[in-house]
Amino acid sequence: MFLVVLWNFHERALPARKKNGSSQYTSWEAGSMSGKGKTARLILCCATGGLLLWQPQAAAQGFESGIQLCLRTVLPALFPFFVLCDWMMGFVGDGRALRPAARFLGMRNASGVLAILLSWLGGYAVAARLAGQLRREGTLSARDASQVMLLGCCSSPGFVIGCVGGLLLGNLALGVLLYGLQLSANLLSTALCLPLLPVASSAPQGACLIPQKNSFSGALGRAVDSSLQVCGCVLFFRTVAAAVLPFLPEQPLVQPLLSGLLEITAGCADFARLGGKPALYGICFCLSTLGLSVWAQLSMLLQGAVSCKLLAWNRAIHLVLFVLLVRLCTPFLPAECAVYSTLATRVIPMYRLPWDAAVVVFCFLCAALYKVRQNFYNK
Protein backbone atom coordinates (compact mmCIF):
# COMPACT_ATOMS: atom_id res chain seq x y z
CA MET A 1 0.00 0.00 0.00
CA PHE A 2 2.76 2.42 0.92
CA LEU A 3 4.62 1.62 -2.30
CA VAL A 4 1.55 2.53 -4.32
CA VAL A 5 1.05 5.75 -2.36
CA LEU A 6 4.65 6.85 -2.76
CA TRP A 7 4.74 5.92 -6.46
CA ASN A 8 1.52 7.75 -7.32
CA PHE A 9 2.16 10.80 -5.15
CA HIS A 10 4.13 12.67 -7.79
CA GLU A 11 1.66 11.76 -10.54
CA ARG A 12 -1.40 12.97 -8.63
CA ALA A 13 -0.08 15.97 -6.73
CA LEU A 14 1.97 17.54 -9.50
CA PRO A 15 0.08 17.33 -12.77
CA ALA A 16 1.16 19.17 -15.89
CA ARG A 17 -2.11 20.76 -16.99
CA LYS A 18 -2.48 22.59 -20.28
CA LYS A 19 -5.23 24.65 -21.77
CA ASN A 20 -5.46 26.05 -25.29
CA GLY A 21 -2.01 24.76 -26.09
CA SER A 22 -0.29 26.69 -23.28
CA SER A 23 0.64 25.59 -19.79
CA GLN A 24 -1.95 26.88 -17.33
CA TYR A 25 -0.46 25.57 -14.11
CA THR A 26 3.18 24.99 -13.39
CA SER A 27 4.73 22.42 -11.07
CA TRP A 28 7.61 22.93 -8.68
CA GLU A 29 9.07 19.69 -9.98
CA ALA A 30 8.52 20.32 -13.65
CA GLY A 31 11.37 18.80 -15.56
CA SER A 32 11.95 16.02 -13.03
CA MET A 33 10.14 13.42 -15.13
CA SER A 34 13.30 12.25 -16.87
CA GLY A 35 14.49 8.67 -16.86
CA LYS A 36 16.90 9.32 -14.01
CA GLY A 37 14.13 10.87 -11.94
CA LYS A 38 11.89 7.84 -12.45
CA THR A 39 14.75 5.50 -11.54
CA ALA A 40 15.44 7.46 -8.36
CA ARG A 41 11.77 7.34 -7.42
CA LEU A 42 11.66 3.60 -8.03
CA ILE A 43 14.69 3.10 -5.78
CA LEU A 44 13.11 5.29 -3.10
CA CYS A 45 9.85 3.34 -3.25
CA CYS A 46 11.64 -0.01 -2.97
CA ALA A 47 13.84 1.21 -0.10
CA THR A 48 10.85 2.59 1.81
CA GLY A 49 8.82 -0.57 1.30
CA GLY A 50 11.72 -2.76 2.41
CA LEU A 51 12.24 -0.59 5.49
CA LEU A 52 8.60 -0.93 6.50
CA LEU A 53 8.77 -4.71 6.05
CA TRP A 54 12.02 -4.89 8.04
CA GLN A 55 10.55 -2.99 11.00
CA PRO A 56 6.88 -4.03 11.13
CA GLN A 57 6.49 -3.46 14.88
CA ALA A 58 7.95 0.06 14.76
CA ALA A 59 5.88 0.86 11.67
CA ALA A 60 2.71 -0.30 13.42
CA GLN A 61 3.50 1.87 16.43
CA GLY A 62 4.15 4.85 14.17
CA PHE A 63 0.85 4.26 12.36
CA GLU A 64 -0.99 4.07 15.68
CA SER A 65 0.61 7.30 16.92
CA GLY A 66 -0.31 8.93 13.60
CA ILE A 67 -3.96 7.95 14.04
CA GLN A 68 -3.97 9.40 17.56
CA LEU A 69 -2.36 12.58 16.25
CA CYS A 70 -5.00 12.94 13.55
CA LEU A 71 -7.88 12.32 15.96
CA ARG A 72 -6.61 14.53 18.77
CA THR A 73 -4.82 17.37 16.95
CA VAL A 74 -5.04 17.46 13.15
CA LEU A 75 -8.76 16.96 12.58
CA PRO A 76 -10.00 19.17 15.46
CA ALA A 77 -7.62 21.95 14.37
CA LEU A 78 -8.12 21.80 10.59
CA PHE A 79 -11.54 20.38 9.70
CA PRO A 80 -13.69 23.19 11.22
CA PHE A 81 -11.49 25.82 9.56
CA PHE A 82 -11.73 24.02 6.22
CA VAL A 83 -15.52 24.20 6.38
CA LEU A 84 -15.84 27.74 7.72
CA CYS A 85 -13.18 29.34 5.51
CA ASP A 86 -14.57 27.72 2.36
CA TRP A 87 -18.10 28.75 3.28
CA MET A 88 -17.14 32.31 4.27
CA MET A 89 -15.65 32.97 0.84
CA GLY A 90 -19.19 33.01 -0.55
CA PHE A 91 -20.58 35.66 1.81
CA VAL A 92 -18.26 38.61 1.38
CA GLY A 93 -20.08 40.45 -1.40
CA ASP A 94 -17.89 42.37 -3.81
CA GLY A 95 -15.03 42.77 -1.34
CA ARG A 96 -14.96 46.58 -1.35
CA ALA A 97 -13.57 46.73 2.19
CA LEU A 98 -10.55 44.68 1.14
CA ARG A 99 -9.72 46.57 -2.04
CA PRO A 100 -7.30 49.05 -0.36
CA ALA A 101 -5.34 46.15 1.10
CA ALA A 102 -5.36 44.42 -2.29
CA ARG A 103 -3.97 47.54 -3.99
CA PHE A 104 -1.31 47.83 -1.28
CA LEU A 105 -0.21 44.23 -1.91
CA GLY A 106 -0.39 44.68 -5.69
CA MET A 107 -3.20 42.14 -6.11
CA ARG A 108 -5.81 42.38 -8.84
CA ASN A 109 -8.58 40.73 -6.81
CA ALA A 110 -9.65 41.25 -3.21
CA SER A 111 -10.26 37.54 -2.79
CA GLY A 112 -6.53 37.08 -2.34
CA VAL A 113 -6.54 39.34 0.73
CA LEU A 114 -9.44 37.44 2.25
CA ALA A 115 -7.66 34.15 1.57
CA ILE A 116 -4.57 35.47 3.41
CA LEU A 117 -6.61 36.58 6.43
CA LEU A 118 -8.38 33.23 6.62
CA SER A 119 -5.06 31.43 6.25
CA TRP A 120 -3.68 33.27 9.28
CA LEU A 121 -6.52 31.73 11.26
CA GLY A 122 -6.61 28.27 9.69
CA GLY A 123 -2.94 27.69 8.89
CA TYR A 124 -1.00 26.41 5.90
CA ALA A 125 -3.63 23.86 4.85
CA VAL A 126 -6.28 26.56 4.51
CA ALA A 127 -3.82 28.70 2.51
CA ALA A 128 -3.13 25.87 0.06
CA ARG A 129 -6.80 24.93 -0.12
CA LEU A 130 -7.97 28.46 -0.98
CA ALA A 131 -5.03 29.39 -3.21
CA GLY A 132 -5.45 26.24 -5.30
CA GLN A 133 -9.21 26.64 -5.56
CA LEU A 134 -9.09 30.34 -6.50
CA ARG A 135 -6.35 29.73 -9.06
CA ARG A 136 -8.15 26.85 -10.74
CA GLU A 137 -11.36 28.87 -10.93
CA GLY A 138 -9.49 31.77 -12.57
CA THR A 139 -10.28 34.18 -9.74
CA LEU A 140 -6.59 34.78 -8.97
CA SER A 141 -3.67 35.19 -11.32
CA ALA A 142 -0.49 33.15 -10.91
CA ARG A 143 1.22 36.09 -9.20
CA ASP A 144 -1.62 36.67 -6.74
CA ALA A 145 -1.94 32.95 -5.93
CA SER A 146 1.81 32.73 -5.25
CA GLN A 147 1.55 35.79 -3.02
CA VAL A 148 -1.28 34.16 -1.07
CA MET A 149 0.91 31.11 -0.44
CA LEU A 150 3.94 33.17 0.62
CA LEU A 151 1.98 35.37 3.02
CA GLY A 152 -0.58 32.83 4.24
CA CYS A 153 1.55 29.70 4.68
CA CYS A 154 1.92 29.53 8.45
CA SER A 155 0.89 27.43 11.42
CA SER A 156 -2.50 28.22 12.94
CA PRO A 157 -2.81 30.18 16.21
CA GLY A 158 -4.46 27.17 17.83
CA PHE A 159 -1.34 25.10 17.20
CA VAL A 160 1.31 27.74 17.94
CA ILE A 161 -0.34 29.42 20.93
CA GLY A 162 -2.33 26.56 22.43
CA CYS A 163 -0.25 23.48 21.63
CA VAL A 164 3.31 24.81 21.35
CA GLY A 165 3.12 27.68 23.85
CA GLY A 166 0.61 26.40 26.38
CA LEU A 167 1.24 22.64 26.35
CA LEU A 168 4.78 22.03 25.08
CA LEU A 169 6.63 25.09 26.42
CA GLY A 170 4.33 25.85 29.35
CA ASN A 171 4.30 29.57 28.54
CA LEU A 172 1.24 30.98 26.81
CA ALA A 173 2.84 34.42 26.36
CA LEU A 174 5.73 32.78 24.51
CA GLY A 175 3.24 31.05 22.23
CA VAL A 176 1.58 34.39 21.40
CA LEU A 177 5.01 35.87 20.68
CA LEU A 178 5.98 32.97 18.41
CA TYR A 179 2.74 33.32 16.44
CA GLY A 180 3.23 37.07 15.98
CA LEU A 181 6.87 36.70 14.99
CA GLN A 182 5.93 33.93 12.58
CA LEU A 183 3.60 36.30 10.72
CA SER A 184 6.23 39.05 10.84
CA ALA A 185 8.75 36.70 9.26
CA ASN A 186 6.14 35.87 6.60
CA LEU A 187 5.81 39.54 5.69
CA LEU A 188 9.56 40.20 5.63
CA SER A 189 10.47 37.08 3.65
CA THR A 190 7.69 37.78 1.13
CA ALA A 191 8.98 41.35 0.67
CA LEU A 192 12.42 39.92 -0.14
CA CYS A 193 10.90 37.45 -2.62
CA LEU A 194 8.77 39.98 -4.52
CA PRO A 195 11.23 40.18 -7.48
CA LEU A 196 10.88 36.40 -7.89
CA LEU A 197 7.09 36.40 -8.20
CA PRO A 198 5.55 35.56 -11.60
CA VAL A 199 4.97 38.49 -13.94
CA ALA A 200 1.52 39.99 -13.50
CA SER A 201 -0.82 39.08 -16.35
CA SER A 202 -2.93 41.57 -18.23
CA ALA A 203 -6.18 39.85 -17.33
CA PRO A 204 -9.02 42.14 -16.26
CA GLN A 205 -9.41 42.74 -12.58
CA GLY A 206 -12.12 40.74 -10.89
CA ALA A 207 -14.48 42.61 -8.66
CA CYS A 208 -16.23 39.79 -6.88
CA LEU A 209 -14.77 36.87 -5.02
CA ILE A 210 -15.95 33.30 -5.41
CA PRO A 211 -19.43 33.12 -6.99
CA GLN A 212 -22.31 32.98 -4.55
CA LYS A 213 -23.08 29.38 -5.53
CA ASN A 214 -21.03 28.16 -2.55
CA SER A 215 -23.23 26.19 -0.17
CA PHE A 216 -22.58 24.70 3.23
CA SER A 217 -22.94 21.15 1.90
CA GLY A 218 -20.39 21.85 -0.84
CA ALA A 219 -17.96 23.38 1.65
CA LEU A 220 -18.45 20.40 3.95
CA GLY A 221 -17.72 17.90 1.17
CA ARG A 222 -14.57 19.70 0.07
CA ALA A 223 -13.43 19.96 3.69
CA VAL A 224 -13.81 16.18 4.12
CA ASP A 225 -11.69 15.51 1.02
CA SER A 226 -8.98 17.94 2.12
CA SER A 227 -8.93 16.55 5.67
CA LEU A 228 -8.52 12.99 4.39
CA GLN A 229 -5.58 14.07 2.23
CA VAL A 230 -3.92 15.80 5.16
CA CYS A 231 -4.42 12.82 7.50
CA GLY A 232 -3.06 10.45 4.83
CA CYS A 233 0.18 12.44 4.63
CA VAL A 234 0.51 12.54 8.42
CA LEU A 235 -0.02 8.77 8.75
CA PHE A 236 2.49 7.94 6.02
CA PHE A 237 5.34 10.08 7.32
CA ARG A 238 4.75 9.14 10.96
CA THR A 239 5.00 5.48 9.97
CA VAL A 240 8.19 6.03 7.98
CA ALA A 241 9.78 8.04 10.81
CA ALA A 242 9.04 5.27 13.34
CA ALA A 243 10.63 2.68 11.03
CA VAL A 244 13.76 4.78 10.38
CA LEU A 245 14.44 5.75 14.00
CA PRO A 246 15.90 2.39 15.20
CA PHE A 247 18.71 2.66 12.62
CA LEU A 248 19.88 6.10 13.77
CA PRO A 249 22.45 6.80 16.51
CA GLU A 250 21.12 7.53 19.99
CA GLN A 251 21.97 11.22 20.23
CA PRO A 252 19.80 13.92 21.87
CA LEU A 253 19.27 15.86 18.63
CA VAL A 254 18.82 12.94 16.23
CA GLN A 255 15.20 12.10 16.97
CA PRO A 256 14.00 15.74 17.13
CA LEU A 257 15.70 16.54 13.81
CA LEU A 258 14.25 13.47 12.12
CA SER A 259 10.78 14.22 13.48
CA GLY A 260 11.03 17.89 12.48
CA LEU A 261 12.11 17.07 8.93
CA LEU A 262 9.26 14.61 8.48
CA GLU A 263 6.34 15.95 10.53
CA ILE A 264 5.93 19.33 12.22
CA THR A 265 3.85 18.27 15.25
CA ALA A 266 6.17 15.44 16.31
CA GLY A 267 9.20 17.66 15.71
CA CYS A 268 7.89 20.40 18.00
CA ALA A 269 7.06 17.85 20.71
CA ASP A 270 10.51 16.20 20.53
CA PHE A 271 12.36 19.53 20.57
CA ALA A 272 10.27 20.74 23.53
CA ARG A 273 11.54 17.79 25.59
CA LEU A 274 15.10 19.11 25.26
CA GLY A 275 14.28 22.28 27.19
CA GLY A 276 16.04 25.64 27.12
CA LYS A 277 17.32 27.28 23.95
CA PRO A 278 17.47 24.01 21.95
CA ALA A 279 13.72 23.63 22.48
CA LEU A 280 12.92 27.22 21.47
CA TYR A 281 15.08 27.38 18.34
CA GLY A 282 14.22 23.81 17.40
CA ILE A 283 10.54 24.72 17.39
CA CYS A 284 11.39 27.74 15.21
CA PHE A 285 13.11 25.33 12.83
CA CYS A 286 9.99 23.14 12.65
CA LEU A 287 7.62 26.06 12.15
CA SER A 288 9.71 27.42 9.27
CA THR A 289 10.71 24.27 7.40
CA LEU A 290 7.25 22.68 7.96
CA GLY A 291 8.46 19.11 7.29
CA LEU A 292 7.95 16.69 4.40
CA SER A 293 4.46 15.83 5.58
CA VAL A 294 3.30 19.45 5.26
CA TRP A 295 4.97 19.81 1.85
CA ALA A 296 3.14 16.72 0.68
CA GLN A 297 -0.12 18.17 1.98
CA LEU A 298 0.53 21.46 0.17
CA SER A 299 1.22 19.66 -3.10
CA MET A 300 -1.92 17.58 -2.82
CA LEU A 301 -4.11 20.57 -1.95
CA LEU A 302 -2.62 22.86 -4.60
CA GLN A 303 -2.66 20.14 -7.30
CA GLY A 304 -0.12 22.03 -9.38
CA ALA A 305 -2.17 25.25 -9.45
CA VAL A 306 0.62 27.18 -7.66
CA SER A 307 4.35 26.53 -7.88
CA CYS A 308 6.01 25.38 -4.65
CA LYS A 309 9.56 26.14 -5.79
CA LEU A 310 9.35 29.81 -4.83
CA LEU A 311 7.70 28.83 -1.54
CA ALA A 312 10.68 26.60 -0.72
CA TRP A 313 13.11 29.52 -1.15
CA ASN A 314 10.78 31.71 0.87
CA ARG A 315 10.72 29.27 3.79
CA ALA A 316 14.54 29.15 3.86
CA ILE A 317 14.61 32.94 4.22
CA HIS A 318 11.77 32.69 6.71
CA LEU A 319 13.85 30.40 8.96
CA VAL A 320 16.72 32.90 9.19
CA LEU A 321 14.42 35.85 9.86
CA PHE A 322 12.29 33.92 12.34
CA VAL A 323 15.28 32.86 14.44
CA LEU A 324 16.66 36.41 14.45
CA LEU A 325 13.32 37.88 15.52
CA VAL A 326 12.93 35.31 18.30
CA ARG A 327 16.45 35.98 19.52
CA LEU A 328 15.77 39.72 19.65
CA CYS A 329 12.34 39.59 21.30
CA THR A 330 12.47 36.73 23.83
CA PRO A 331 14.66 38.64 26.36
CA PHE A 332 11.80 41.10 26.84
CA LEU A 333 9.40 38.40 28.03
CA PRO A 334 8.87 38.11 31.80
CA ALA A 335 10.82 35.11 33.06
CA GLU A 336 11.57 33.32 36.30
CA CYS A 337 14.98 33.52 37.98
CA ALA A 338 16.48 31.50 40.80
CA VAL A 339 16.75 33.10 44.26
CA TYR A 340 18.87 32.04 47.27
CA SER A 341 20.90 29.94 44.86
CA THR A 342 23.89 29.95 47.27
CA LEU A 343 21.96 28.60 50.25
CA ALA A 344 21.60 25.01 51.26
CA THR A 345 18.90 22.81 49.79
CA ARG A 346 16.87 22.99 53.02
CA VAL A 347 16.12 26.55 54.20
CA ILE A 348 14.38 27.15 57.54
CA PRO A 349 12.66 30.56 57.52
CA MET A 350 12.49 32.79 60.60
CA TYR A 351 9.11 33.74 62.05
CA ARG A 352 7.61 35.22 65.25
CA LEU A 353 5.85 33.17 67.89
CA PRO A 354 2.28 33.96 68.87
CA TRP A 355 1.96 36.10 72.04
CA ASP A 356 0.67 33.28 74.24
CA ALA A 357 3.48 30.95 73.22
CA ALA A 358 5.99 33.78 73.76
CA VAL A 359 4.70 34.31 77.33
CA VAL A 360 5.05 30.60 78.14
CA VAL A 361 8.58 30.51 76.75
CA PHE A 362 9.49 33.65 78.71
CA CYS A 363 8.21 32.16 81.96
CA PHE A 364 10.10 28.93 81.32
CA LEU A 365 13.34 30.80 80.70
CA CYS A 366 12.86 32.87 83.85
CA ALA A 367 12.28 29.73 85.93
CA ALA A 368 15.32 28.07 84.40
CA LEU A 369 17.55 31.06 85.17
CA TYR A 370 16.21 31.24 88.71
CA LYS A 371 16.94 27.58 89.28
CA VAL A 372 20.48 27.97 87.94
CA ARG A 373 21.08 31.00 90.20
CA GLN A 374 19.90 29.08 93.26
CA ASN A 375 22.24 26.19 92.49
CA PHE A 376 25.23 28.48 92.09
CA TYR A 377 24.26 30.57 95.18
CA ASN A 378 23.93 27.54 97.47
CA LYS A 379 27.37 26.34 96.50
Image: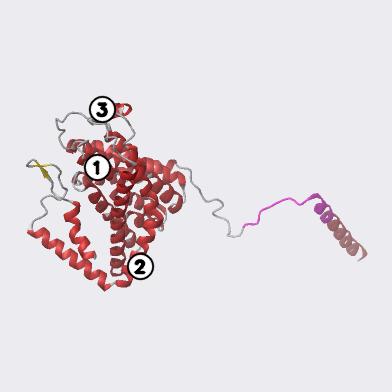
Q: Circle 3 sits in a helix, a strand or a loop, which is it? A: helix
Q: Is residue 60 magenta?
A: no
- Whole-percent x and y of residue 74? 36, 53
Tag in front: 1 or 3: 1
Crowd class of label 1 (few under 14; some 14 to 19; many from 20; radius 10 Å)? many
Q: Nearer the viewer, residue 173 or 228?
A: 228
Q: Quadrant of the N terminus?
A: bottom left
On the question of residue 368 being in view, the answer is yes
Whichever of callouts 1 and 3 sits on the residue coming sooner in the sequence is 3
Number of the label disc, if any, that sits on residue 133: 1
Q: CA distance from mark 2 to mark 1?
A: 35 Å
Going 32% across and 56% down the picture, which residue do you hit? 231
Please give the range of residues in magenta.
Answer: 347-361
Going 54% across and 54% down the picture, which residue do you hit? 341
Is the Cβ of the residue at disc 2 closer than 8 Å to that at disc 3?
Answer: no
Asked whether, in this view, residue 101 is left or right of residue 307, the answer is right
